[in-house]
Image: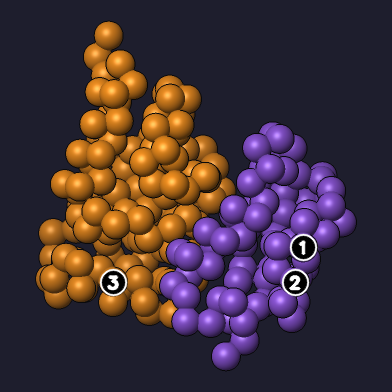
Chain colours: A orange, B purple
Amino acid sequence: MSAELRERIKSVIETEPVALFMKGTPQFVMCGNSERALRALRGSGAPVTAVDVLPDPEIRQELSALSGWPTIPQVFIGGELVGGADIVQELAETGQLEQKLNEALGESYRDDAEERVVSVLVPA
Amino acid sequence: MTAELESILREAFPEASEVRVTDRTGGGDHFLVEVTSPRFDGLPLLEQHRLVNEALAAPFASGRIHEMRIKTKGTA
Protein backbone atom coordinates (compact mmCIF):
# COMPACT_ATOMS: atom_id res chain seq x y z
CA MET A 1 0.00 0.00 0.00
CA SER A 2 2.47 2.65 1.08
CA ALA A 3 5.04 1.41 -1.45
CA GLU A 4 2.55 2.04 -4.21
CA LEU A 5 1.65 5.40 -2.74
CA ARG A 6 5.31 6.32 -2.71
CA GLU A 7 5.66 5.31 -6.35
CA ARG A 8 2.71 7.50 -7.26
CA ILE A 9 4.16 10.48 -5.45
CA LYS A 10 7.52 9.89 -7.08
CA SER A 11 5.93 9.69 -10.48
CA VAL A 12 4.17 13.05 -9.99
CA ILE A 13 7.45 14.64 -8.91
CA GLU A 14 9.35 13.19 -11.84
CA THR A 15 6.83 13.71 -14.61
CA GLU A 16 5.08 16.98 -13.75
CA PRO A 17 6.97 20.14 -14.76
CA VAL A 18 5.85 21.89 -11.57
CA ALA A 19 4.40 19.89 -8.70
CA LEU A 20 2.86 21.57 -5.67
CA PHE A 21 2.02 19.34 -2.71
CA MET A 22 -0.42 21.37 -0.69
CA LYS A 23 -3.20 21.36 1.86
CA GLY A 24 -6.39 21.58 -0.16
CA THR A 25 -6.61 22.35 -3.85
CA PRO A 26 -5.97 25.56 -5.81
CA GLN A 27 -9.76 26.01 -5.87
CA PHE A 28 -10.09 25.47 -2.14
CA VAL A 29 -6.85 26.14 -0.29
CA MET A 30 -6.86 24.93 3.30
CA CYS A 31 -3.72 26.59 4.62
CA GLY A 32 -2.10 30.02 4.41
CA ASN A 33 1.29 28.60 3.53
CA SER A 34 -0.06 26.55 0.66
CA GLU A 35 -1.80 29.72 -0.46
CA ARG A 36 1.49 31.66 -0.42
CA ALA A 37 3.28 29.01 -2.45
CA LEU A 38 0.44 28.83 -4.97
CA ARG A 39 0.33 32.61 -5.31
CA ALA A 40 4.09 32.78 -5.93
CA LEU A 41 3.88 30.09 -8.60
CA ARG A 42 0.87 31.70 -10.26
CA GLY A 43 2.63 35.06 -10.24
CA SER A 44 5.51 33.51 -12.12
CA GLY A 45 3.16 31.94 -14.66
CA ALA A 46 4.07 28.41 -13.69
CA PRO A 47 2.07 25.40 -14.95
CA VAL A 48 1.06 24.10 -11.53
CA THR A 49 0.11 20.50 -10.93
CA ALA A 50 -1.33 20.37 -7.43
CA VAL A 51 -1.60 17.38 -5.14
CA ASP A 52 -3.77 17.62 -2.04
CA VAL A 53 -2.04 15.90 0.88
CA LEU A 54 -5.04 16.06 3.21
CA PRO A 55 -7.10 13.05 2.07
CA ASP A 56 -4.62 10.62 3.68
CA PRO A 57 -1.94 11.38 6.31
CA GLU A 58 0.25 8.76 4.65
CA ILE A 59 0.72 11.02 1.63
CA ARG A 60 2.52 13.51 3.81
CA GLN A 61 4.65 10.85 5.50
CA GLU A 62 5.73 9.28 2.23
CA LEU A 63 6.37 12.65 0.62
CA SER A 64 8.59 13.85 3.47
CA ALA A 65 10.43 10.53 3.49
CA LEU A 66 11.13 10.97 -0.22
CA SER A 67 12.07 14.63 -0.16
CA GLY A 68 13.66 14.97 3.26
CA TRP A 69 11.55 18.10 3.75
CA PRO A 70 9.43 18.19 6.90
CA THR A 71 6.61 20.58 6.08
CA ILE A 72 3.80 21.26 3.61
CA PRO A 73 3.69 22.83 1.03
CA GLN A 74 6.51 21.42 -1.07
CA VAL A 75 7.30 22.66 -4.55
CA PHE A 76 9.18 20.65 -7.16
CA ILE A 77 10.31 22.04 -10.49
CA GLY A 78 11.62 19.65 -13.12
CA GLY A 79 11.74 16.87 -10.54
CA GLU A 80 13.78 18.83 -8.02
CA LEU A 81 12.70 20.10 -4.63
CA VAL A 82 12.72 23.89 -4.62
CA GLY A 83 11.41 24.29 -1.09
CA GLY A 84 8.42 25.36 0.95
CA ALA A 85 6.34 28.53 1.02
CA ASP A 86 9.04 30.81 2.43
CA ILE A 87 11.61 29.82 -0.17
CA VAL A 88 9.25 29.92 -3.14
CA GLN A 89 7.92 33.29 -2.07
CA GLU A 90 11.41 34.70 -1.64
CA LEU A 91 12.54 33.29 -5.00
CA ALA A 92 9.47 34.81 -6.67
CA GLU A 93 10.17 38.22 -5.15
CA THR A 94 13.75 38.24 -6.41
CA GLY A 95 12.90 36.95 -9.89
CA GLN A 96 14.80 33.72 -9.31
CA LEU A 97 11.68 31.60 -9.54
CA GLU A 98 11.08 32.65 -13.16
CA GLN A 99 14.73 32.02 -13.86
CA LYS A 100 14.45 28.51 -12.42
CA LEU A 101 11.30 27.84 -14.46
CA ASN A 102 13.06 29.07 -17.60
CA GLU A 103 16.01 26.83 -16.98
CA ALA A 104 14.01 23.73 -16.11
CA LEU A 105 11.08 24.04 -18.52
CA GLY A 106 12.31 26.29 -21.31
CA GLU A 107 11.59 29.92 -22.13
CA SER A 108 8.07 29.20 -23.37
CA TYR A 109 6.87 27.63 -20.13
CA ARG A 110 4.12 30.25 -19.73
CA ASP A 111 2.52 29.49 -23.09
CA ASP A 112 0.19 26.74 -22.10
CA ALA A 113 0.49 27.02 -18.36
CA GLU A 114 -2.67 25.53 -17.00
CA GLU A 115 -3.43 24.51 -13.47
CA ARG A 116 -4.45 21.00 -12.70
CA VAL A 117 -5.02 18.75 -9.74
CA VAL A 118 -3.97 15.13 -9.58
CA SER A 119 -4.53 12.51 -6.92
CA VAL A 120 -1.91 10.09 -5.66
CA LEU A 121 -4.40 8.00 -3.70
CA VAL A 122 -4.20 4.30 -4.34
CA PRO A 123 -7.67 2.97 -5.20
CA ALA A 124 -8.95 0.64 -2.49
CA MET B 1 8.41 28.42 23.57
CA THR B 2 9.94 31.42 21.81
CA ALA B 3 12.86 31.47 24.25
CA GLU B 4 13.24 27.71 24.01
CA LEU B 5 13.44 27.81 20.21
CA GLU B 6 15.88 30.69 20.36
CA SER B 7 18.21 28.85 22.69
CA ILE B 8 18.11 25.71 20.52
CA LEU B 9 19.00 27.84 17.50
CA ARG B 10 21.80 29.67 19.30
CA GLU B 11 23.27 26.34 20.22
CA ALA B 12 22.94 25.03 16.66
CA PHE B 13 24.27 28.25 15.11
CA PRO B 14 26.81 29.60 17.64
CA GLU B 15 28.42 31.66 14.86
CA ALA B 16 25.15 33.40 13.91
CA SER B 17 25.14 37.19 13.98
CA GLU B 18 21.39 37.15 14.48
CA VAL B 19 18.91 34.65 15.86
CA ARG B 20 15.38 35.82 16.36
CA VAL B 21 12.18 33.91 17.01
CA THR B 22 8.88 35.78 16.85
CA ASP B 23 5.54 34.45 17.99
CA ARG B 24 3.53 35.65 14.99
CA THR B 25 0.07 35.27 16.43
CA GLY B 26 0.63 35.40 20.18
CA GLY B 27 -0.76 31.90 20.43
CA GLY B 28 2.59 30.24 21.01
CA ASP B 29 2.45 27.96 17.98
CA HIS B 30 3.05 30.13 14.88
CA PHE B 31 6.63 31.27 14.68
CA LEU B 32 8.88 33.30 12.47
CA VAL B 33 12.45 32.14 12.76
CA GLU B 34 15.21 34.43 11.50
CA VAL B 35 18.84 33.38 11.38
CA THR B 36 21.74 35.33 9.90
CA SER B 37 24.94 33.35 9.78
CA PRO B 38 28.14 33.17 7.76
CA ARG B 39 27.43 29.45 7.50
CA PHE B 40 24.76 30.31 4.93
CA ASP B 41 27.17 32.17 2.66
CA GLY B 42 27.08 30.59 -0.78
CA LEU B 43 24.50 27.98 0.22
CA PRO B 44 21.27 27.68 -1.78
CA LEU B 45 18.17 28.78 0.13
CA LEU B 46 16.96 25.19 0.20
CA GLU B 47 20.06 24.10 2.11
CA GLN B 48 19.89 27.11 4.42
CA HIS B 49 16.33 26.24 5.38
CA ARG B 50 17.26 22.59 5.68
CA LEU B 51 19.83 23.44 8.36
CA VAL B 52 17.25 25.40 10.32
CA ASN B 53 14.67 22.65 9.93
CA GLU B 54 17.18 20.10 11.18
CA ALA B 55 18.06 22.20 14.20
CA LEU B 56 14.39 22.49 15.13
CA ALA B 57 13.42 18.92 14.29
CA ALA B 58 12.79 17.90 17.90
CA PRO B 59 10.44 20.74 18.93
CA PHE B 60 8.75 20.43 15.56
CA ALA B 61 8.16 16.72 16.06
CA SER B 62 6.65 17.43 19.46
CA GLY B 63 3.59 18.79 17.68
CA ARG B 64 3.67 22.04 19.62
CA ILE B 65 4.57 24.07 16.56
CA HIS B 66 1.76 24.55 14.14
CA GLU B 67 3.60 26.76 11.69
CA MET B 68 7.16 27.88 11.27
CA ARG B 69 8.25 30.54 8.82
CA ILE B 70 11.94 30.67 8.14
CA LYS B 71 14.06 33.56 6.98
CA THR B 72 17.77 32.94 6.55
CA LYS B 73 20.57 35.21 5.45
CA GLY B 74 24.26 34.87 4.90
CA THR B 75 26.62 37.58 6.04
CA ALA B 76 28.70 37.92 2.87
Q: Residue at x 87, y 56 (%)?
A: B3
10 Å crowding of disc 3: few (<14), some (14-19), many (20+): some
Residue A121 is drawn in which quadrant?
top left
Helix, strand or loop under label 2 = loop
B49 lies above or below A57 = below
Q: Are marks 1 and 2 in contact (CB under 8 Å)?
A: yes
In the rendered image, which residue does mark 1 sit on? Answer: B11
In the rendered image, which residue does mark 2 sit on? Answer: B14
A86 lies above or below A52 = below
Residue B64 in view in this figure? yes
Q: Residue reaching furthest bottom?
A: B76
Marks 1/3: CA–CA distance: 34 Å
B37 lies above or below A116 = below
Q: Tell me the amino acid under the disc marked 2.
A: Pro
Residue A76 is drawn in which quadrant?
bottom left
Return the residue nearer the eye: A26 or B19.
B19
In the rendered image, which residue does mark 3 sit on? Answer: A100
